């Protein structure tokens, strides 16, 4: 049995970032997850076609600033980071005016985002964590959780651990959220994201492309260094299974199938595609925990990241929203009055109030946009494409949206 100040549960990017940030503040942190084996620094730093992770993230300025503050950004291999200067979005009606263009120049910012492989972020977080004396990592499965006035007691496969506060970053299927009985709104979309990386014959020009396709599919091509792109294709679950199977049996046919989705527009801007990675997939859903704290009286547990919220990837903001949870949590803890304990309800509710508006706004906007493009009615089609065209003609509104996306 051990006693720490804070237990962080979850071995993904959110869990690793939260544990590192809190430890850097001088707090004694115990980081628990089923598999916390540290990846060797440089394991995938070689720039070749076989080593590129197909799971990539669009990192916003607020997320970059957080990683810089935690001394993680500079540990990322710079030849694995692709800055995004432009974003071009196409409607599903086929009219030339059904088009939306965001540019860093119009937004008066250096970049709109940065595309980075998930694995590279985790490697950098693991490396930074290895230097933290206040941070203890244990690979363990959670068996049960009890809360009390003093804090939390976690029974795990490696023993019992106690702390005044638990940060749950254990993903969309959070066991902690379930144990604590936090009501959660979950809407499963009958859509699955298919992801894969390609080499293209034309330069990507630091541009992210997104096509809304007839029938509700969304095809995104995100730029990677060295004339590569990463695909995120949101499609029906049955079609996604067919695509993954086709990729395994006939990579060339799979690549041609991707090119055929946009009536030649994709090939026009990126050229021919050569598959670099096996296609994988994951189901899409909207998830929102009704509250971020538990129990309701004397809370001792905080939900962050996918344990608290999940959205459709069409806006590329899922990870950024989770990292803003961590940014605000660190701010609250850093500004804690000396008289308050780490699990003081006033302190924890201060964090919850900071996050509710951001989470609700982004989840709602993303969900309604996805539903609008799923609708097959002529009215909805006119509305979404005309709206896109009108927005493209308003530099002021576009600048405001860019600043909002930067966090």
Image (cartoon, rainbow, N blue to C red):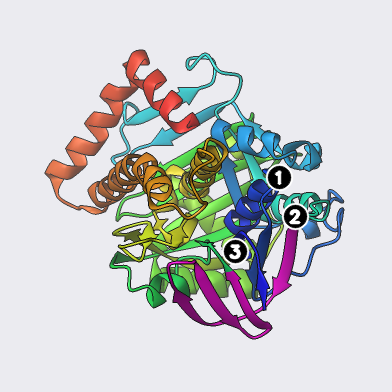
Instruction: Estimate the x, y position of residue 85 in percent, counting from the top left.
Output: 59, 26
Distance of mark 3 from mark 1, alpha carbons? 14 Å
Closer to the chain start, of discs 3 and 2, is: 3
- State left or right for residue 388 relative to residue 127: left
Secondary structure found at label 2: loop
Distance of mark 3 from mark 2, alpha carbons? 12 Å
Q: Quadrant of residue 154?
A: bottom right
Closer to the chain start, of discs 3 and 1, is: 3
Instruction: Estimate the x, y position of residue 210 in percent, counting from the top left.
Output: 46, 41
Q: Which residue is mark 2?
A: 134
Please state the extent of the stretch shown in magenta in the rendering.
134-162
Marker disc for residue 127: none
Quarter of the image with the N terminus in it:
bottom right
The answer to whether the residue labelled 2 contacts the one labelled 1, judged by CB atoms less than 8 Å apart, is: yes
Compare residues 284 and 215 and report the one nearer the observer. Answer: 284
Q: Which residue is mark 3?
A: 7
Compare residues 327 and 213 and report the one nearer the observer. Answer: 327
Badge 1: residue crowd in 10 Å (few <14, some 14–19, many ≥20)? many
Closer to the chain start, of discs 2 and 1, is: 1
The answer to whether the residue labelled 3 contacts the one labelled 2, judged by CB atoms less than 8 Å apart, is: no
Instruction: Estimate the x, y position of residue 364 in percent, counting from the top left.
Output: 28, 46
Does residue 289 show up?
yes
Marker disc for residue 24: 1
Relative to residue 280, is residue 212 depicted above or below?
A: above
Compare residues 316 and 260 and report the one nearer the observer. Answer: 316
């Amino acid at each position: 049995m051990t006693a720490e100040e804070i237990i962080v549960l979850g071995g993904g990017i959110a869990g690793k970032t939260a544990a590192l940030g809190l430890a850097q503040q001088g707090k004694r942190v115990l980081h628990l997850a089923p598999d916390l084996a540290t990846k060797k620094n440089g394991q995938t730093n070689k720039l070749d076609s076989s080593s590129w992770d197909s799971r990539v993230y669009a990192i916003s300025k607020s997320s970059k600033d957080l990683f810089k503050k935690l001394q993680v950004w500079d540990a990322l291999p710079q030849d694995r980071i692709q800055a995004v200067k432009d974003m071009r979005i196409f409607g599903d009606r086929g009219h030339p005016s059904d088009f939306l263009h965001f540019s860093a120049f119009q937004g008066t910012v250096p970049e709109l985002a940065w595309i980075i492989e998930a694995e590279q972020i985790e490697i950098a977080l693991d490396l930074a964590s290895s230097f933290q004396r206040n941070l203890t990592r244990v690979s363990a499965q959670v068996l049960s959780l009890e809360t009390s006035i003093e804090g939390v007691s976690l029974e795990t496969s490696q023993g019992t651990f106690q702390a005044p506060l638990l940060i749950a970053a254990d993903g969309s299927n959070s066991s902690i959220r379930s144990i604590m009985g936090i009501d959660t709104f979950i809407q499963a979309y009958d859509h699955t994201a298919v992801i894969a990386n390609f080499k293209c014959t034309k330069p990507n020009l630091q541009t992210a492309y997104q096509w809304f396709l007839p029938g509700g599919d969304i095809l995104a091509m995100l730029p990677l260094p060295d004339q590569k792109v990463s695909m995120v294709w949101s499609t029906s679950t049955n079609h996604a299974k067919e695509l993954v199977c086709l990729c395994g049996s006939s990579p060339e046919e799979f690549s041609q199938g991707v090119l055929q989705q946009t009536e030649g527009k994709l090939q026009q801007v990126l050229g021919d595609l050569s598959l670099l990675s096996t296609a994988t997939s994951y189901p899409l859903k909207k998830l929102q925990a009704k509250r971020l704290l538990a129990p309701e009286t004397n809370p001792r547990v905080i939900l962050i990241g996918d344990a608290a919220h999940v959205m459709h990837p069409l806006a590329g903001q899922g990870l950024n929203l989770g990292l803003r949870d961590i940014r605000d949590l660190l701010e609250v803890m850093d500004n804690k009055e000396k008289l308050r304990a780490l699990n003081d309800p006033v302190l924890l509710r201060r964090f919850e109030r900071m996050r509710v508006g951001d989470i609700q706004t982004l989840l709602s906007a993303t969900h309604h946009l996805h539903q609008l493009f799923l609708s097959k009615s002529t009215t909805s089609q006119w509305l979404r494409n005309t709206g896109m065209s009108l927005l493209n003609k308003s530099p002021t509104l576009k600048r405001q949206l860019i600043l909002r996306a930067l966090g």
